[in-house]
Image (cartoon, rainbow, N blue to C red):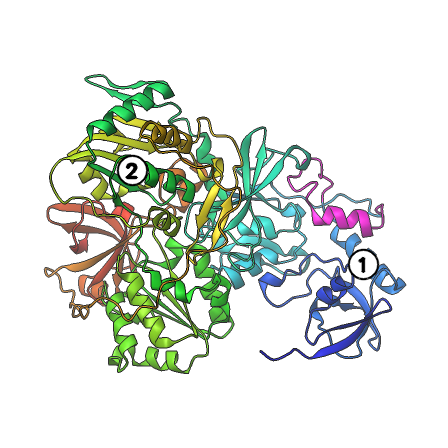
Amino acid sequence: MSTPELVRVTIDGRDLQVPKGTGMVEAALSAGIEIPVFCYEPRLGPPVGACRMCLCEVEGMPKLQAACTMTAQDGLILRTAQTSPQAAEGQDAVLEFILLNHPLDCPDCDKGGECPLQDLTFRWGPGKTRMRFPKRTFDKPIPISPLIGLDRERCILCYRCTRFSELVAEDGQLVALNRGSQSIIATFEDEPYRAHFSGNVIEVCPVGALTSTTYRFRGRPWEIQNVPTVCGLCPVGCNVWATTREGKVARILSRNHPEVDEGWICDKGRFAYDHLRAEDRIRQPLRRVRRRGFDRVSWDEALDEAERGLREAGGSVVVALSGGETVEQATALAWLVQDGLGSRTALLPETIHPAVDHFRAPLSAIRDADVCVVVGDHPVIERAPVLDLWLRSARRAGGEVITLNPGGTIPLPPGSAAWACAALAKGGAPKELAGVARSLKRAKSVALVWSEDDPTGGAHIAALAEAVGDKAAVYYVPRAPNGRGVAAAWGEADDPPRDGEIGALIVSGDEVTADPRVRELAERARFVLTTAMFENELTLWSHLVLPGTSYLERDGTTVNLEGRPQRQHRAVAPPVDDETAFFAELARRFGVELTPWSSSPPTDHAPLPERSEGGAPVKAPSPKTNGRPGRGLELVRYRGLFTGAAVERVPQLQFQRSLAEVELAAADALERGIATGEAVRVSSNGTSRTLTARVNRRLLAGVVRIEDEHAEGLDARVEVTRA
């Protein structure tokens, strides 16, 4: 890496040496000199100089300059408002202009006490106003979505929110309308702001114009505590602050980790916390009673029942893990079952090939990659949303982002991920992958992303990385938030028996109940012990149900998709004891003593194994189907981000759930006379569902895509007709 060229600049009489091109706001800050800003936010891309709060005097220039738009050049001499009367006068005028129509409602504003405008007005403002006319007012709050309210009279037109929408999330849904004094912030065509990352505009807003409807009027800065923790709702492991008030979680804020999330979080991570207060939450152990359903029992009675059921299992015990557990919880279960009950049979959320760890890199490395190749049928934004933001930033930086799936930049038939990896790894790639092979060969840095449910997927993507060489970084995207940590904690596991009776089944977590394999195991088990926060289809099959906890209610370690161990901290006390304590006491009854957990996370994983020599044998993808009516279309199902027990219990999040749509290729839609927005009937094997059609011109002919929630009962091949 080349050493950056240093240049000499002078700020308020202090001589500094900084790398050439450094922003003057950062250069001044390195010398302990603050240049106040509103619109400036480096994460949003190039500065726009909209607010003019950073006006400074630059030697050789006749007028004041916006320091945020300037970079360090040799010999530059700059004076801030602290030493320049002209700059101070300019800043006073800017603040006076910003406050011209700004309401004096700080005591009522949710931003009060945390507001940059409030702080800078006290520190830099004139102290009193000269204006004696009525201020402009609007209706308030304007609901730009069920999650976000807009107080338009507070807006200072810094354009942070619209820049985030346009340049970071790239959803284009927040726009500035009109010109001059009539400029306002609004949503495109007044539609609700429905996007995976919409809540980030609440945080980037430097005033109280954009506020959270779920937090509005719920707390003041002097009444709250912010607990640092890690989001446990997807495998990215975003760093967050959990704001608590009176023992309850009141909001979630991002906690910028520049290598993991860069300070952005998705709306599921930001707003799903309200499920902790759901009325239907299980708060006491439940024991099945014949002909009467369930009875509430004490924890001691639950321990007795669990011990009885597990002893009668005679060593025939299967554990189904959701992947939402901490490493400590998974370890407690492993020691109980392996050492106390003599079983190593488990249904793990992930089986990650060890060779993947040879190509670990921070998520931030994606931004600097020359080529990013994404393989797998599952949309990355639905599985690991912030990973999708890193891919977008790579493309904006000039990198090439190639997606290999039925709707990708290179359309491939469903299930082609393993074949594509093998073909690219062997060289002499087929014609549809020839361009990818050339890009990989000439790139100086490569990011490889696997996003598909395949237990052998890690081997395939690692084999491709081996062929690409040391310039490759691998990102295997698990289904579960802590799939990697749980798999590592459990170790080697035997697969559950395919048939026959099972002595006992232990089910951990709410999300695993959606797995049809778990339901089939429950039907064959003599005793079923389930840990869950809410009643579901599987708890009805259980003999003993234990109250579960959320990631916000426990301490422990998680491992994100890049293999980074991170520490979760308890934000609030759960209404019940942590289930780990229950299993620790249960283990003692079977002669297993669980050691106290470390107060700090592991620094790294175990020594890395040898590199993979290649993946498992793979078949070539199926030939393209012509998609003619009567011959059926191949169904690709995927799990949407806004699904699960947590989302279902937050009313404001319901509008974010996927629409009841079916994606059709343009050729298939034309053949059937179907247009976007029309009602269609999707049928297979006697099951029929009415959905809304959406024509995707990039989707491979002969393939349809439906989110899992709307594809229940449909087989692998379906027919689509007009309703």
Residue shown at 62%/51% (left/top)?
Answer: 205
User: Is residue 394 something that shows in the picture?
Assistant: yes
Task: State the residue position of label 1.
Answer: 91
- Relative to 114, is 691 on the left or the right? left
In the rendered image of this protein, does residue 46 appear above or below residue 498?
below
Which element carries disc 1, helix, strand or loop?
helix
Magenta stretch: includes residue 604: no
Residue shown at 48%/69% (left/top)?
Answer: 394
Which element carries disc 2, helix, strand or loop?
helix
What is the number of the mark on residue 337? 2
Q: Quadrant of residue 628?
A: bottom left
Magenta stretch: includes residue 115: yes
Q: Residue 339 or 650: which is nearer the viewer?
A: 339
In the rendered image of this protein, does residue 533 appear above or below residue 361?
above
Inspect the image, locate mark 1, and give the three-letter code of the amino acid beneath it. Gln
Residue shown at 10%/59% (left/top)?
Answer: 630
Q: Residue 102's x, y, as percent?
A: 72, 46
- Relative to 629, is 463 on the left or the right? right
Circle 2 packing at 10 Å, graded few (<14), some (14-19), many (20+), is many
| Quadrant including the N terminus | bottom right
In the rendered image of this protein, does residue 211 appear above or below residue 612?
above
Residue with the most extreme front position:
591
- Relative to 24, is 295 on the left or the right? left
In the rendered image of this protein, does residue 119 appear above or below residue 676?
above
Q: Residue 668's x, y, as percent?
A: 21, 64
Q: Residue 312 or 242: which is nearer the viewer?
A: 312
- Magenta span covers which residues? 103-129
